[in-house]
Amino acid sequence: MAKAGGERMLVSRIEEGTVIDHIPDWRADTVSRVLRLDKLARMQADISVVILQNVSSKGLGRKDIIKIDRWHVDERDADILCLVFPGITVNYIDEGKVSKYAPRVPDTIEGRLRCPELNCISNAEREPVTTRFVTLKKESVLQCQYCDALLGFEKVPDHVRT
């Protein structure tokens, strides 16, 4: 399929899956880490992941795109991505039909992030505590429910539980 300006996209369309679009250029690796795509690829042999980096974009100039064949990104994970990349879009494809999901900043996040405070009870292996963060949207930070430690939105990828 030829694109304007002589560019050509060499990736086929998917009938079932997810396309994450409008990722800032050269940042798809961060999205992949947050979504744990390497773990997904090892667990599900029939899933294909295509990462397009530094693709021409009218609105952004350059952008990255991730296409995941035969797997739908959980909306809660898409919402976590929204903390780091507010402009991303998530497109779910079912039987070739696209439905768009606009990720939004979640009010709380449970079990997906590690607390940055090493002494927090949620980091103790002997304690069966699930992490819980409350979003302080005006400050662009998350606050741990247990120890009140703050985690800036930009630091979220470094604290994702794998």
Image (spheres, helix red, strand yellow):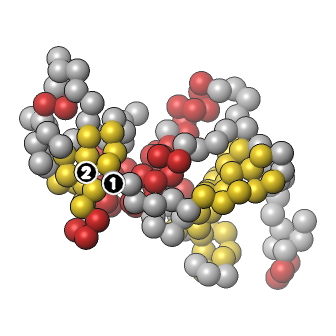
Q: Is residue 2 above or below residue 43?
A: below
Q: Can you name the residue that lies furthest to the right here?
A: 1
Judging by the rendered image, the residue that carries numbered circle 2 is 134
Residue pictured at 71% horizontal, 44% vertical: 17
Residue pictured at 59% horizontal, 67% vertical: 22
Dividing the picture into quadrants, the one containing residue 6 is bottom right
Dividing the picture into quadrants, the one containing residue 46 is top right
- Residue 104 is left or right of residue 60, and the answer is left
Camera-nearest residue between 29 and 132: 132
Label 2 is placed on what type of residue? Val
- Checking the image for residue 57, the label placed there is none
Residue 107 position in % (x across, y down)? 33, 54
Label 1 is placed on what type of residue? Asp
Judging by the rendered image, the residue that carries numbered circle 1 is 107
Camera-nearest residue between 95 and 34: 95
Residue 80 position in % (x across, y down)? 42, 52
Crowding at mark 2 (Cα within 10 Å: few <14, some 14-19, many 20+): some
Q: Quadrant of the N terminus?
A: bottom right
Residues under labels 2 and 1: Cα distance? Answer: 6 Å
Number of numbered discs overlaid on the protein picture: 2
Q: Is residue 116 visible?
A: no
